[in-house]
C-alpha cells in the first residue's frame, strides 16, 4: 500500500467519524464561527460586533498558477463581523501577512511573473467582504434559512506567487437546524471565479459545506465539517479555479464573551494542503445601539 493510499484511508475514516458524531452527540446552540468556515444562518445581533484573530499553518500548500508549493503560515488571521440589525450582518476577514516556505517549483501559467527568487515568499492575504441575512428563524418544524453574498478582493499579487489578481463573487444558501441537541449546518451555492491568465474568462463553481457542533460541557464544544467547491466546466477548470475540499475538526472553549478555538484540517484534493492547523480567539461585545423606528 502506498503512502497516498494510507492517507486516503485515514481521511475516509475521519470523515465517517465526523458523520457518526454529528448524528449521535449533543451540542450547544452557538452560531458556528471559528475554527469552522461553513456559515450558520444565525447572525450575531443588531449592535453587536464580533472580532476574531488567530493563525493558520498549512503543510504542502500548492499554488498551481504560480507553480509554487510549500508550507504556509498566515498570521494574524483577522475577522470583523458587525450586526447591522437582528437579521443582518456585515463581514470582513483576511490576513495582513502570509509567508510561504517554498519546497518546490514547477512550470505554471504565471510562473514567469514571479519575483521571489529565494526559498520564501510573502504577501498580504486577499480581503473578503460579505453580507449575511437571516431569512427565516428556526422553529420546531423547520430549519433556519439565510443567504450570504461575498466578494474576494485581489490584494495578494501574482508576482509573489500567493495571489491571483482576480475578483471573485460568492453566493450561498445557508441552512441550520438543531436536532435534539446537535446543531447541523449546510451551505450550497455558487461562485464566479476570474481566470488569472485571461481577463475576459471566468469559471462557475458549486460551493458546498456541511458542519456539526456539539457540547461536551457547558463551555466546551467539539466541531467538524467538510467544505469546498466543485468545478463545473466539462473541459476542465481554468487555472486557479480547480475543485477543492477540506475536512476539518476541532474544539472551542467559551468563557463569557470570549471563545478560544483550535482545529486540524485535511486536504481532500491535489489542490489542497495535505494537513493544516488553525487556532484563534473570538470576542463579542455591544458596540452601538440601533436607531429606534
Image: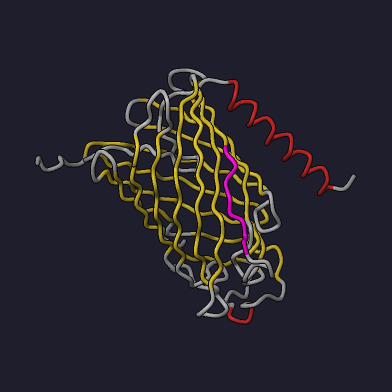
Locate the N terminus by quadrant: top right
> What residue is shown at x 62% (from left), y 72% (from top)?
66
Whether residue 63 is situated above or below residue 197 in the rendered picture = above
Residues shaded magenta: 225-232
* 200 left or right, relative to 18: left
Count the numbered circles shown.
0
> What residue is shown at x 66% (from left), y 45% (from top)?
266
Farthest right residue?
1
Q: Is residue 230 magenta?
A: yes
Q: Is residue 202 magenta?
A: no
x, y percentage for residue 48? Answer: 25, 39
- Using the image as rendered, state which of residue 272 and residue 68 is in the foreground: 272
* 169 left or right, relative to 121: left
Whether residue 244 is situated above or below residue 84 in the rendered picture = below
- Using the image as rendered, state which of residue 63 and residue 12 is in the foreground: 12
Locate the C terminus by quadrant: top left
Where residue 63 sits, quadrant-wise, is bottom right
* 48 left or right, relative to 263: left
Whether residue 152 is situated above or below residue 90 in the rendered picture = below
Where residue 234 sits, quadrant-wise, is bottom right
Amino acid at each position: 500500500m502506498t503512502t497516498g493510499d494510507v492517507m486516503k484511508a485515514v481521511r475516509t475514516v475521519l470523515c465517517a467519524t465526523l458523520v457518526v458524531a454529528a448524528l449521535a452527540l449533543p451540542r450547544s446552540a452557538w452560531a458556528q464561527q471559528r475554527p469552522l468556515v461553513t456559515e450558520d444562518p444565525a447572525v450575531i445581533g443588531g449592535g453587536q460586533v464580533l472580532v476574531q484573530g488567530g493563525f493558520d499553518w498549512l503543510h504542502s500548500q500548492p499554488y498551481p498558477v504560480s507553480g509554487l508549493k510549500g508550507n504556509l503560515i498566515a498570521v494574524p488571521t483577522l475577522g470583523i463581523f458587525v450586526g447591522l440589525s437582528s437579521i443582518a450582518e456585515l463581514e470582513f476577514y483576511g490576513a495582513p501577512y502570509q509567508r510561504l516556505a517554498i519546497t518546490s517549483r514547477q512550470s505554471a501559467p504565471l510562473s514567469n511573473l514571479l519575483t521571489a527568487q529565494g526559498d520564501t515568499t510573502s504577501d498580504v492575504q486577499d480581503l473578503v467582504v460579505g453580507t449575511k441575512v437571516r431569512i427565516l428563524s428556526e422553529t420546531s418544524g423547520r430549519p433556519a434559512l439565510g443567504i450570504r453574498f461575498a466578494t474576494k478582493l485581489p490584494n495578494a499579487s501574482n508576482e509573489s506567487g500567493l495571489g491571483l489578481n482576480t475578483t471573485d463573487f460568492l453566493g450561498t444558501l445557508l441552512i441550520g437546524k438543531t436536532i435534539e441537541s446537535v446543531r447541523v449546518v449546510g451551505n450550497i451555492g455558487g461562485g464566479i471565479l476570474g481566470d488569472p491568465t485571461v481577463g475576459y474568462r471566468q469559471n462557475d463553481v458549486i460551493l458546498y459545506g456541511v458542519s456539526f457542533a456539539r457540547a461536551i460541557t457547558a463551555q466546551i464544544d467539539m466541531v467538524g465539517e467538510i467544505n469546498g467547491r466543485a468545478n463545473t466546466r466539462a473541459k476542465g477548470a481554468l487555472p486557479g479555479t480547480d475543485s477543492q475540499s477540506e475536512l476539518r475538526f476541532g474544539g472551542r472553549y467559551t468563557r463569557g464573551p470570549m471563545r478560544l478555538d483550535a482545529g486540524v484540517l485535511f486536504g481532500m484534493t491535489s489542490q489542497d494542503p495535505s494537513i493544516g492547523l488553525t487556532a484563534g480567539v473570538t470576542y463579542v461585545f455591544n458596540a452601538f445601539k440601533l436607531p429606534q423606528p
